[in-house]
Amino acid sequence: MIRGLYIAGTGMLTQRNKMDVITNNLTNADTIGFREESMLSRTFEDMLLDRENDPAVLRQDRQVGPLSTGTHIDEINISFGQGAPEETGLTTDMAIEGDGFFVVNTPAGDRYTRAGNFTLDAQGVLRDVLGNPVQGENGNITLTSDHFVVRSDGTIFDEVTGNQVARLRIVEFTNEDNLREQAGNLFYVYQDAGMRDAENSAVLQGYIESSNVNIANQMVSMIIASRAYETSQRVAGMIDQTLDAAVNDIARF
């Protein structure tokens, strides 16, 4: 009976954590380059109980029935589907059409992002919203002014002289499941993600990529999680009432 309380409790905790993931998605629905997350859960492996103390059992290795020990979080899955491009007209704004990622240099090393709402600092260094320098094929990208043109392959030309000044470093991953999120729209590589130079990506200047969060789907998921939480809560209440009756009523006889 107590195990039933544990199972109901783990169900409530799982749904609460799922609600946190959904809330984070909705909060970042307007965050440029944000990627929708989903939480996967599964039951613990079935636990087999041995009737070791039963004298009627001659074979002590005999096992009696599976008994679930509740649910737990398996993993947080990130959807890397394309977000809708939104035109801004700003020369420093860029979006990627395809599977590629911009590369930025952070104090912790290179990080990868789809958020292309960049700016130029006083020294002409192209930076992301967190102040990290955007990386080109030869390191940090430095421009003399905001009068530049970015071609689809990431090459940057000075609009006045017509000379190429840099080329954006765009990378793709053959195994995006090994990317981990950091700071909302930055990602880092966990184990081997199969990083390579982008082959199927194009840069759009004057655009930003919106998040790929589907608000309607998130609202449906929120309702499902809420109902599942309430069900586990009712089960816990029923078991509590049964225990109360066993202790206070049955014990009188």
Image (spheres, rainbow, N blue to C red):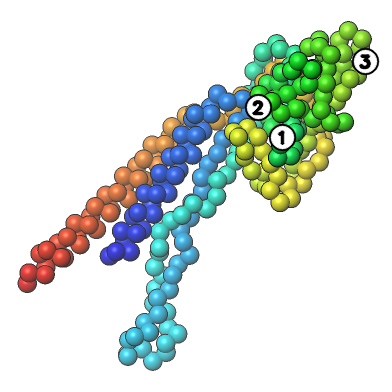
Q: Position of residue 24 (x, y in %)?
A: 50, 34
Farthest left residue?
253
Residue beneath the point at 55% across and 46% down: 76
- Disc 2/disc 3 C-alpha distance (Å): 29 Å
Q: Is residue 82 above or below residue 149?
A: below
SS of the residue at dot 3?
loop
- Precedes in sequence: disc 1 or disc 3: 1
Q: Is residue 65 above or below residue 3?
A: below
- Precedes in sequence: disc 2 or disc 1: 1
Discs 2, 1 touching: Cβ within 8 Å:
yes
Query: In the drawing, what numbered circle is on residue 130?
Result: 2
Residue beneath the point at 6% across and 72% down: 253
The foreground one among 228 and 21 is: 21
Q: Position of residue 164 (x, y in %)?
A: 91, 19
Query: In the drawing, what numbered circle is on residue 185?
Result: none
Residue type at mark 1 is: Thr
Q: Position of residue 188 (x, y in %)?
A: 69, 41
For mark 1, does the 10 Å Cα neighbourhood hold few (<14), some (14 to 19), or many (20 or more) residues?
Answer: few
Query: In the drawing, what numbered circle is on residue 106?
Result: 1
For mark 3, does the 10 Å Cα neighbourhood hold few (<14), some (14 to 19), or many (20 or more) residues?
Answer: few
Kindly identify which residue carries mark 3. 163
- Disc 1/disc 3 C-alpha distance (Å): 29 Å
Q: Quadrant of residue 224?
A: top left
Residue type at mark 3 is: Asn
SS of the residue at dot 2?
loop
